[in-house]
Image (spheres, rainbow, N blue to C red):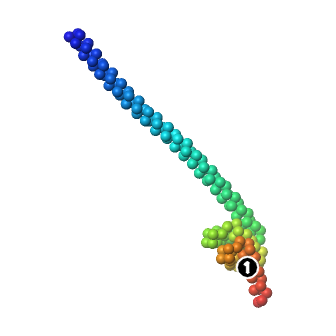
Amino acid sequence: MGIGFAISAKNASKATFEEVQKDLGATEKKSEDVSEGFEKLGESMKEGGIVVAAAGGALLATLAVGAVKAHEVAEALKLVGTRADESLLPLEAVQKSVLALSNQYGTSQTDEAKAYYDAIGLGANDEASSLALVTAATQLSVGAHIDLKTAMDTAAQAARAYAERR
């Protein structure tokens, strides 16, 4: 019985060892699969990182352009404030009109604010008359495919000619 037990134990340990080796082989295969998965993930992250970095750079550039444009609009509105009589033409009303005209006609807010500055210089110094002149110039600009400054000059000349004939 001692020898039989030893042989049985040897056979059992051999079978167990083979099973362990088989399990280790499967574990090694799974480990290789996981390793390949991590490598692919790393490559994707590198590529994604480049895409994210590029998108981040584009976003920063867009924000910078937006900040510059916002500064230009603010400067143009400051100019309007130097000419406008706040009691006749509140700067807040100009800001709202500039935004509304820009959104409606697809024009530059800076150009719209500069048009208000020119309109006040031409004598349209209250809210109604300045809005009417800037709106007419904006419509002319869009319709004739010319810049707003040229359209404002044209509208001013037309207004002067009309005033002289009256």
Residue type, numbered disc 1: Ala
Q: Residue at x 73, y 79 (%)?
A: 155
Percent x, y of residue 89: 71, 73
**The N terminus is located in which quarter?**
top left
Image position of 7 with respect to 53: above or below: above
Q: Give neighbour class at mark 1: few <14, some 14-19, many 20+ (Cα, 10 Å).
A: many
Image position of 23 with respect to 137: above or below: above
Describe the element under mark 1 as helix, strand or loop: helix
Viewer-closest of 41 and 116: 41
Percent x, y of residue 152: 73, 75
Percent x, y of residue 81: 74, 68
Q: Residue at x 31, y 22 (%)?
A: 16
Viewer-closest of 79 and 29: 29
Q: Residue at x 77, y 71 (%)?
A: 83
The residue at the far top in this view is: 2
Identify residue for label 1. 155
Q: Residue at x 70, y 58 (%)?
A: 68
Instruction: Please give left or right for residue 133 compared with residue 1 in the image.
Output: right
